[in-house]
Amino acid sequence: MEQSSNATPKRAMIIIAHPDDGEFMASGTLSKWAKEGTEVTYLLCTSGDKGTSDPTVKPEELAAIREVEQQNAANVVGAKNVVFLRYLDGSLQNTLELRKDISRQIRKYQPDIVICQDPTRRYGEGFINHPDHRAAGDAALDAIFPSARDYHVYPDLIAEGYMPHNVLEVYMGAFGEGANVWVDITDTIDTKIAALMEHKTQMGDDPERLEAMKVRMKENAAQAGAAHAMGYAESFRYIRLRS
């Protein structure tokens, strides 16, 4: 099993495709770090403008609502910064433009640790992973190395005042598949659930459904932690980058 630094990072960034992706994947970890003094930044590639089956809701209206929901969830987590790149939901691609936009934010906020989605997680038992998740993960990794690090990649970012930055550690959401690091979130599992509940457009308002969701979240986190002497845990595929 790979071991993370186990130290509280000074700055951490989570890079995700949609509002609520971060709450499902890593909000227990982010809340744990925030309580220990980490400056947490959320970077969202889209604002989730296609995240409804209601034909009467306009995508631009939904995006505005979901941005507020994400800000509220980030406030629950204890994040300091929330940035929306506002690419279109459902058609995200790992373009040079997206990589540059992510690199700009990495250089601006200078995270020691980045949490992102695993671009190799294509499908599993009973599900196909959203293509936006894979694209966001690919773009995040390509921005981390080498684009945010190398001086000559983006001369215009240098002109804007964004000097290169080396990310030290990467955590990719693993949900138990291919995980090599587990973070104990026993003290923040309720914060994780409370943050997720802020995404009201996605959670709905059926009390039974909401309660079932809360139970399932705790069951999943308990299962992740069971083999590692943790009450509740989040699991990641971890990379320590060479300096």
Image: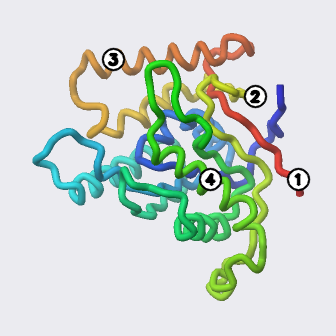
Residue 58 image position (x, y, % from top left): 17, 55
Task: Say which quadrant the N terminus sits in.
Answer: top right
Residue wearing tag 1? 242
Q: Are the residues tagged 3 and 2 within 8 Å (C-beta)?
A: no
In terms of sequence position, does the residue under pointer 4 or pointer 2 come before the other? 4
Helix, strand or loop status at disc 4: strand
Residue located at (63% from left, 67% from top): 103
Mark 2 neighbour density, 10 Å: few (under 14) some (14–19) many (20 or more): some
Residue 13 numbered mark, or none: 4
In this view, the residue in front, 139 or 34, is 139
Q: Going from the N terminus, do you reach mark 1 or mark 2 first? A: 2
Calculate the distance from the C-alpha at mark 4 to the C-alpha at mark 1.
19 Å
Q: Measured along the vertical axis of the image, is residue 122 above or below residue 224?
A: below
Q: Identify which residue is drawn at 36% across, 53% down.
A: 89
Residue 39, image quadrant: bottom right
Categorize mark 4 by other alpha carbons within 10 Å: few (<14), some (14-19), many (20+). many
Q: Which residue is mark 3?
A: 211
Q: Which image quarter is the C terminus in?
A: bottom right
Mark 4 and mark 1 lie on one chain; the one further toward the N terminus is: 4
- What's the residue type where badge 3 is placed? Glu
The earlier-in-sequence mark between 1 and 3 is 3
The earlier-in-sequence mark between 3 and 2 is 2
Q: Amino acid at mark 1?
A: Arg
